Image: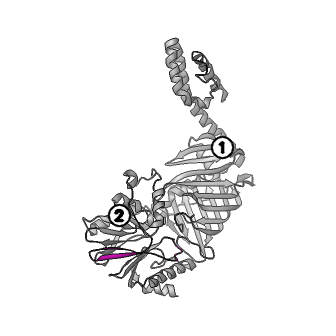
Amino acid sequence: MANKPTSFVRSLVGPIASTRPSGAFPTDVSGTQMLSVLPLLYNAAQFVSLVRGGAMTKKFLSLVALMFVVPLSLAAQDAKTVLQAASKAMGDVKSIQYSGTGHLYALGQAYSPTSAWPQNNITSYTRTIDYGSRSSKEELTQVEPTPPRLGGAAPFAGEQKQINLVSGQYAWNQAGNAPQPAVAAAEERQVQIWLTPHGFLKAAMENNATAKKGSEGTTVSFTTGKFKINGTIDSQNMVTGTETWVANPVLGDMPVETAYSGYKDFSGVKFPTMIVQKQGGYPVLDLAVTGVQPNVSLNLPVPEAARTTTLPPVKVTSQKLADGIWFLAGGSHNSVLVEYPTYLVMIEAPLDEARSTAVIAEAKKLVPNKPIKYLINTHHHFDHSGGVRTYVAEGSTIITHEMNKAYYEQVWKAPHRLEPDRLAQNPKKPTFMTIKEKYTLADAGRALEIYPLEGDTHNAGLMMVYMPKEKILVEADDFSWPAGTRSGPRYHANNVNLYRNVQRLMLDVKTIAPLHGDPVPVSELEKLATS
């Protein structure tokens, strides 16, 4: 099939080439290379029209039109052939269930800006996917390593069990008998179905995929919704990797890369025995697969709560802690606003642009006509830095630990095409003030002190803010009130280290304003740290 267009092209190219000097026009061009010589062919057409008249020109123009169509149809045909061969080799399934053990890593919670995401151990893992209904059920049990690891993510004691589900456009988690809607997770959970080996083949067949030969196999590409998905199929017709990009407030269009290796036969179906997925360049999951069952039944009726719940608007509440100091809460993460005579200082920009935009609006309502001159960023973890770019767009100077500056400057260069934020739409160079040791920001009787914490295992560059006149301490993650699900050796170590730093620095703290939870007397920290 592929030789016929090439022969036809040569039959047309030959007479044209004979009118040119020797070597000026290639006659050994393959069908898939024709587009690269279009400019030369156009010049040849001009020459032919002068020498031989209109008939030859018409014949040549037919060739040019054909060249636009043939490579595209060949690419589609090649992709279909590749996908059919892979489906035959791997086995065509309607559903699949695989299980194993491995590690789960906390995206965006690295101990330092240059280290990998911290890992927990997966003691059991089972995922069941029904491709026809676009449904997935992921069940896992994880434990924290001993001794306690470095880095973030909410600490816990013993085993933590998760059941994460998606069916079509609806996502939810199952904690006991009560489903918990997970609206924000639905889109990514859905695309994760098509990143699995068999899911990739099915989605590629349905979405007009194209194919291109590469050094490691054939790269098959397609687009579903806003996601472009690539996959590699090797010479044995096995899917060895898939990749796509998802929106992340810090990393922008973040790569999601999954590698599959060690294929074995499970009841007539080929499936990898090792799965490694990376997000943002570091692993978020590695799984040693020990069991696979093809064509298992998965019935996931969508709970009413998941079907009817929508993303709520961002809520910001304000609580006055002292004159000119407000605690801005209303969600899972908090900020603190401090008023100076001619400007404002904001402590923390968590989560994303939506949260930062709402917090900035509340600040302007509380204190009109004063700019937010400084944003204090306590550490680089994504849930505490996802809104920093919004303050750059606002014109604020970013106060952060010195180790974070180069990291932010580098990762903020990534495109934000999937979900453009203000800084992507109107780029500007960020202004930083970096902290290595105690720094005091004082102006006309108002003062706050910034301290990097010593010996912290949550984040290497974690900083806390102390207001000596008001005796208020603002801190992130080492102490939360109420603690909620935070527990275990790692959380206790954080409590102890925070308390030791307060004592070492001889800070006269009366109130802790945690960036998770509610303001409380410092005695609550003392109880936890000394117990």
| Residue sitting at the far front | 437
**Residue 531 at x, y percent in the picture:** 52, 88
Q: Residue at x 35, y 64 (%)?
A: 358
**Residue 440 at x, y percent in the picture:** 36, 74
Range of magenta residues:
440-459
Using the image, determine if residue 277 lies above or below residue 151: above
The amino acid on which the numbered mark 1 sits, given as a three-letter code, is Ser
Which quadrant would residue 400 be assigned to in this image?
bottom left
Q: In what element is the residue under mark 2?
A: helix
Q: In what element is the residue under mark 1?
A: loop
Mark 2 sits on what residue?
358
**Residue 451 at x, y percent in the picture:** 43, 75
36 to the left or right of 389 = right
The amino acid on which the numbered mark 2 sits, given as a three-letter code, is Ala
Mark 1 sits on what residue?
215
Which quadrant would residue 189 be assigned to in this image?
bottom right
| Residue sitting at the far top | 52
Question: Is residue 53 visible to us here?
Answer: no
441 is within the stretch colored magenta: yes
Question: Is residue 509 visible to us here?
Answer: yes
Between 340 and 58, the one nearer to me in the picture: 340
Between 189 and 417, the one nearer to me in the picture: 417
Between 478 and 411, the one nearer to me in the picture: 411
84 is within the stretch colored magenta: no
